[in-house]
Amino acid sequence: MTSVAVVGRARNSRRDPELTKREILDAAAEEFSRHGAYGAKTEDIARRTNTTKRMIYYYFGSKEGLYAAVLLENYVRVRSLETHLGLEEHDPVEALRMLVRATLDHYERYPELARMVGMENLIKQGETAAQLEGLEELNRSAPATLAEILRRGREEGVFRSDANAPDALDVHQVLSALTLNRVEHQSTFKIAFGRDMLRGKDGAHVRRLIEDTVLRLVLADPAGLES
């Protein structure tokens, strides 16, 4: 069985700049999610990727620059995922289900990115996010994608269209809150209540709970919801 370290050395030996940057970003995400923006060490990130601090600074300028790049990478990945689902090819209820499931899948695959978003809010109070060039423009696609799903659903009469019906940003906020909470609070929730929100039967139950909650928020007749 080939170890991750051996694979990393083999990859870096080819001196592929894009691959090297990708490996640094992935390793940095793990380190920042464990130790925070201030506690993570570039020496440890370099060691995990078989590179050097000098190489990291060459690509990202500084540790803060690397942290910013990893934070931005979260938004790039999830927005790219949303726009490549082909949601327009599915009826609005199924499209919304697909979007919820893809978002849950993303943060199950990259829980370190969810934790970084949490720390950016709680510890840095959005200081780095506020300086990310193009972040607002990048994220416009999220409510735009939901707005199109909601528009189609309302035209077909399957989604609410009353005066108090949630708009696209409302739905995005609820989905983001439930999805990130599932990752960020996994450990303490399991200790306090014995429920692992990410693993096993509990994890599957929580996935269905989040999906149903988002759908009930918009359905004209939530009584007919089928998970």
Image (cartoon, helix red, strand yellow):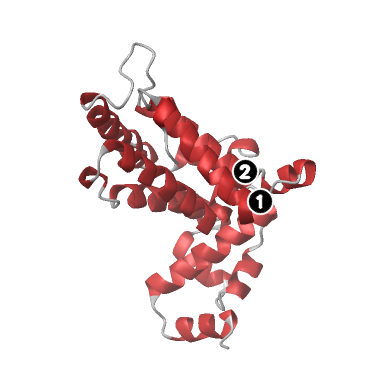
Q: For the residue marked with disc 2, what is the amino acid?
A: Met
Quadrant where the C terminus sits is top left
Which residue is found at the position 21% from the left and 25% from the top?
A: 155
Residue 36, numbered label: 1
Is residue 171 visible from the viewing direction of this image? Answer: no
The part of the image, by quadrant, that contains residue 192 is top right
Q: Residues within 10 Å of mark 2 (few under 14, many from 20)?
A: some
* SS class, disc 2: helix
Which residue is found at the position 62% from the left and 64% from the top?
A: 42
Tell me residue 123's x, y (percent): 65, 39
* SS class, disc 1: helix
Q: For the residue marked with disc 1, what is the amino acid?
A: Gly
Which residue is found at the position 46% from the left and 31% from the top?
A: 173
Tell me residue 210's x, y (percent): 51, 38
Q: Residue furthest right?
A: 192
Q: Is residue 191 above or below residue 136?
A: below
Is residue 73 or residue 15 the one in the foreground?
A: 73
Looking at the image, is mark 1 or mark 2 earlier in the sequence? Answer: 1
Is residue 13 or residue 87 the one in the foreground?
A: 87
Q: Are the residues at dot 1 and dot 2 in contact (C-beta closer than 8 Å)?
A: yes
Label 2 belongs to which residue?
Answer: 119
Is residue 196 visible from the viewing direction of this image? Answer: yes
